């Protein structure tokens, strides 16, 4: 089976390569062929000669820089339609006996739209024929190759050429040119007056060297290229310079339209453990026009599974571009007729759209959509890509957004449709739609004609925002049911903030604010008891109809900065401690008072009266219950040190090192609360170690109250009374480290360079960039000899009598065995599950114009190996040989 697959793939490569090669012009850059350039057909020596010994005087003025270029006007009887002009930097002379002009050193000749430049040019004015070639320098290196421009064609380089102005016939020798990521070579090409070309001993490969040292190419003995069709003689494969003539096609006839055309998409073949033999991605390419194309593909498996997809791309230059992909899979597992037999249907839809800002100033529209069944990536092995990021993902999200600015940018409107999907729980959260209208802050009491500084009341600022949301949370299975549609929650929220900021006594910042919030809901909720056969049970009913809720609050506070300096200790020259304390007084009325009508009460199953908000669970929450009047406080710390450094000689050999960045504690104390007046104390911070190579982030929460283990609840008694300052309820820690920062810098520079070129990229190149950006192991940089990086994440939570700890370690890296061989790996360990995460090893071989890689997943569900040989040019990603042996689905 593997031999049959290899033969099929070889013939697919021949078909693809010939189509690419034979659908383009053959004129182009050329491969060096010294034998064809030293002598022309008239046996004239093409190397420069000493003009001082020439018996014939130069009849024309030497064309030095600054002199007008020489030209000649031909009579109409010669058949020429325009002036033939020439120029040479080194020297030129005319042989009067043969009426032949010789040009040396950066010579140039122009006739109508035909332009030619070379180190040596000979023009026979009698026969209207021009010959051009390069020369061998003192190192015997062939330089100064002719560069020719034919009408409506890009500049091409050749070893030598002969061209007749009158008959418009010509011969080119040693052709070598690039065509859409591939390279064409030919020993000779002839063009006639009918714009037809004959090709002799041609080769198509992916190597950009004149003599391909490592290539996978197609050797073509003879070919004829016309405007609309191509006829090819025998063609065979060449691999690593070895001709494989046993894989030969005797002839080929191909249409050559000058526009996109629809056609057959050749499949690949292989085998998987669970689904059997497959014929993958067979399909048809549809070229609708210059702005839109599509691919329809399908995959068939011998055990009954199948997949189908529609990929479409669109692009309008300077306006917008994007594409969408709709994929469906029917995966069958087990033995048909048994209880273990299952047929699972999955789908996935992706859509991306981006708009150029200059296309419609002040308006934005973008889309990034990825939704479908949560089991799609697992059941299809990420669409047969075996992509690590896709296989291990546990969520999907989508967003379609629109924005518009009004009133010279003072009013901003945005709206979006979004979706979030928890693939582990099978839950889907939809927002259809969300919108916001924001008015920039303004000074209502200030005047445009004000002279001098602002008075205190002129510093008052106001703003306005309106938000609207319509959302629902459901399981995947019932997402499109009527019950789900009836569960949509919606609402609107208006906010009007008023702020005043002043400097007091030079060292204090005074801030005061009043905030008013109003909510509009189209539903409210009622709670009560229902008598059932099992006794009284609590129920929650939804009432439809317009409801209005509002609240307001006031706050005023002070903040300042305190600077502290510590004395010199050893190499530590100085330490600076910056403390930023802030305190504020805040007040909010009790909106659970019956006078507002926002809260109700009922008797629960235990006979206790329970108060609840009729807006609990609403889109924007409900007005707060209970009066609040307290003090909010926070303390931020920043600690830096200056130490002596022998390596860093700037600033007198003193280097600044951050010790703590933003260590913050915050909380609130409510004077009028009945119990638990002090809130939890939150803290967060970050720092860097080892010359900022390790970035550490941490955060957590302290509960100042005692927890009764027997009753399973908090007690209104400070923990310090029991000998404990506070109880740690949450803590998180994460850090990452790279032992070779140059590797990350090199990768980022490469991605930045590619991002800058993205507007001019093809869809295939943009997809390749997306893969590199999402997978650190997809970027292979042979210039970096080694890299080793890792990350660690730790989470701890203990709200009461149950502790939950998660910890994961990830490590990835690479090293170069030789300048052309590189080994990559990534793995990790889940301390909670006590198992090794998905582990991969990859070996890459740089073949200059090709890449060869070997990938191995040694254990786990996706245990597999694959060998891939592919062209580096992204336009030729389909031209590849892949042998894969997968144990997908094995446990």
Image (cartoon, rainbow, N blue to C red):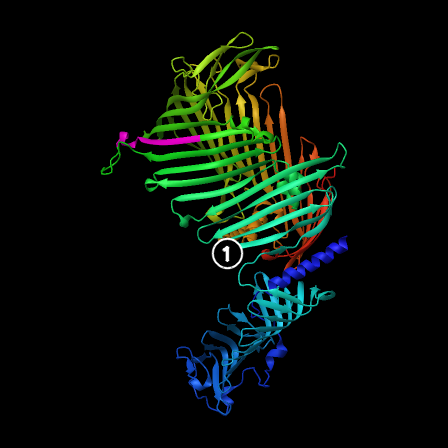
Magenta segment includes 462: yes
Q: Nearer the viewer, residue 424 or 828?
A: 424
Secondary-structure class at tag 1: loop
Q: For residue 383, what is the image quadrant? A: top right
Position of residue 374 measured from the top left corner of the image (x, y, whole percent): 61, 35
Position of residue 298 measured from the top left corner of the image (x, y, whole percent): 65, 47
Residue 26 seen in this snapshot = yes
Q: Nearer the viewer, residue 526 or 328?
A: 328
Position of 437 compared to 858: left or right?
A: left
Point 47% across, 79% down: residue: 88
Position of residue 460 measured from the top left corner of the image (x, y, whole percent): 30, 30
Position of residue 143 measured from the top left corner of the image (x, y, whole percent): 56, 74
Q: Is residue 678 above or below residue 69?
A: above
Q: Nearer the viewer, residue 704 or 297?
A: 297
Residue 506 seen in this snapshot = no
Q: Please provide the residue range marked out in magenta.
A: 455-468
Q: Is residue 148 above or below residue 765?
A: below
Q: Is residue 339 above or below residue 249?
A: above
Q: Residues within 10 Å of mark 1 (few under 14, many from 20)?
A: few
Magenta segment includes 192: no
Q: For residue 451, what is the image quadrant? A: top left
Point 67% across, 32% down: residue: 831
Look at the image and tell me in which quarter the C terminus lies: top right
Q: Which residue is labeled 1 in the image? A: 290
Position of 679 compared to 262: left or right?
A: left
Q: For residue 873, what is the image quadrant? A: bottom right
Q: Nearer the viewer, residue 278 or 620?
A: 278
């Amino acid at each position: 089976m593997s031999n049959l697959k290899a033969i099929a793939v070889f013939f697919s490569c021949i078909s693809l390569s010939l189509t690419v090669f034979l659908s383009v012009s053959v004129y182009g850059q050329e491969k060096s062929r010294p034998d064809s350039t030293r002598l022309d057909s008239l046996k004239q020596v093409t190397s420069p000669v000493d003009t001082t010994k020439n018996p014939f005087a130069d009849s024309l003025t030497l064309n030095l820089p600054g002199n007008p270029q020489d030209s000649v006007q031909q009579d109409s009887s010669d058949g020429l339609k325009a002036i033939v002009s020439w120029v040479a930097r080194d020297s030129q002379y005319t042989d009067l006996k043969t009426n032949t002009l010789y040009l040396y050193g950066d010579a140039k000749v122009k006739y109508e739209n035909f332009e030619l430049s070379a180190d040596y040019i000979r023009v026979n004015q009698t026969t209207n024929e021009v010959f051009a070639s390069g020369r061998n320098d003192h190192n015997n290196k062939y330089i100064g190759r002719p560069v020719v421009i034919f009408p409506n064609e890009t500049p091409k380089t050749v070893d030598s050429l002969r061209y007749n102005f009158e008959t418009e016939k010509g011969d080119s020798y040693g052709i070598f040119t690039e065509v859409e990521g591939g390279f064409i070579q030919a020993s000779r090409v002839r063009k006639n007056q009918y714009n037809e070309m004959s090709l002799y001993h041609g080769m198509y490969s992916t190597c950009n060297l004149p003599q391909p040292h490592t290539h996978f190419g197609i050797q073509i003995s003879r070919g004829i290229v016309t405007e609309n069709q191509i006829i090819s003689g025998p063609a065979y494969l060449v691999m690593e310079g070895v001709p494989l003539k046993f894989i030969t096609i005797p002839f080929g006839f191909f249409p050559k339209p000058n526009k996109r055309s629809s056609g057959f998409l050749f499949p690949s073949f292989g085998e998987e453990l669970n689904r059997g033999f497959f014929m993958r991605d067979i399909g048809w390419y549809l070229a609708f026009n210059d702005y839109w194309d599509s691919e329809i593909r399908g995959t068939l498996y011998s055990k009954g599974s199948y997949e189908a997809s529609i990929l479409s791309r669109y692009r309008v230059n300077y306006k917008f571009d994007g594409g969408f992909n709709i994929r469906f899979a029917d995966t069958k597992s087990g033995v048909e007729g048994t209880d273990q037999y299952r047929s699972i249907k999955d789908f996935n839809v992706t859509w991306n759209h981006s708009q150029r800002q200059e296309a419609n100033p002040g308006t934005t529209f973008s889309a990034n959509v990825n939704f479908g069944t949560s089991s799609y990536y697992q059941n299809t092995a990420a669409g047969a890509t075996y992509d690590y990021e896709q296989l291990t993902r546990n969520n999907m999200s989508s967003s379609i957004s629109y924005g518009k600015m009004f009133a010279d940018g003072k009013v901003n409107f945005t709206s979006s449709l979004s979706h979030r999907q928890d693939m582990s729980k099978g839950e889907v959260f939809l927002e259809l739609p969300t919108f916001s209208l924001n008015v920039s802050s303004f000074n209502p009491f200030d005047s445009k004609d004000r002279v001098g500084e602002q008075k205190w009341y002129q510093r008052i600022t106001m703003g306005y925002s309106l938000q609207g949301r319509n959302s629902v949370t459901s399981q995947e299975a019932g997402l499109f049911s009527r019950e789900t549609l009836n569960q949509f929650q919606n609402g609107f929220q208006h906010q009007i903030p008023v702020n005043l900021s002043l400097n007091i006594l030079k060292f204090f910042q005074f801030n005061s604010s009043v905030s008013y919030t109003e909510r509009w809901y189209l539903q409210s909720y009622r709670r009560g008891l229902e008598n059932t056969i099992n006794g009284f049970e609590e129920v929650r009913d939804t009432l439809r109809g317009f409801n209005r809720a509002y609240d307001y609050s006031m706050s005023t506070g002070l903040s300042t900065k305190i600077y502290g300096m510590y004395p010199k200790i050893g190499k530590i020259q100085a330490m600076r401690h910056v403390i930023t304390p802030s305190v504020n007084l805040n007040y909010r009325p009790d909106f659970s008072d019956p006078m507002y009508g926002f809260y109700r009460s009922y008797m629960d199953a235990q006979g206790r009266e329970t108060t609840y908000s009729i807006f609990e669970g609403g889109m924007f929450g409900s007005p707060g219950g209970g009066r609040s009047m307290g003090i909010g406080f926070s303390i931020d710390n920043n600690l830096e040190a200056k130490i002596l450094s022998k390596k860093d000689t700037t600033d007198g050999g003193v280097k600044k090192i951050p010790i703590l960045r933003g260590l913050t504690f915050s909380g609130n104390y409510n004077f009028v609360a009945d119990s638990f007046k002090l809130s939890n104390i939150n803290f967060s911070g970050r720092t860097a170690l080892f010359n900022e190579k390790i970035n550490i982030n941490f955060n957590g929460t302290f509960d100042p109250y005692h927890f009764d283990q027997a009753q399973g609840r908090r007690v209104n008694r400070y923990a310090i009374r029991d000998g404990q300052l506070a109880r740690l309820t949450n803590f998180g820690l994460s850090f990452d480290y790279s032992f070779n920062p140059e590797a990350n810098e090199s990768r980022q520079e490469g991605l930045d360079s590619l991002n800058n070129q993205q507007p001019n990229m093809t869809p295939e190149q943009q997809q390749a960039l997306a893969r590199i950006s999402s997978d650190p192991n997809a970027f292979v940089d042979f210039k970096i000899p080694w890299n080793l990086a890792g990350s660690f994440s730790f989470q701890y939570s203990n709200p009461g009598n149950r502790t939950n700890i998660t910890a994961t370690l990830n490590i990835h890296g690479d090293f170069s065995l030789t300048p052309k061989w590189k080994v990559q790996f990534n793995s990790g360990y889940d301390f909670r599950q006590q198992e090794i995460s998905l582990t991969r090893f990859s070996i890459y071989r740089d073949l200059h114009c090709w890449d060869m890689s070997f990938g191995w997943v040694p254990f786990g569900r996706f245990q597999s190996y694959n060998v891939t040989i592919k062209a580096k040019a992204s336009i030729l990603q389909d031209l590849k040989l892949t042998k894969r042996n997968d144990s997908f689905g094995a446990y």
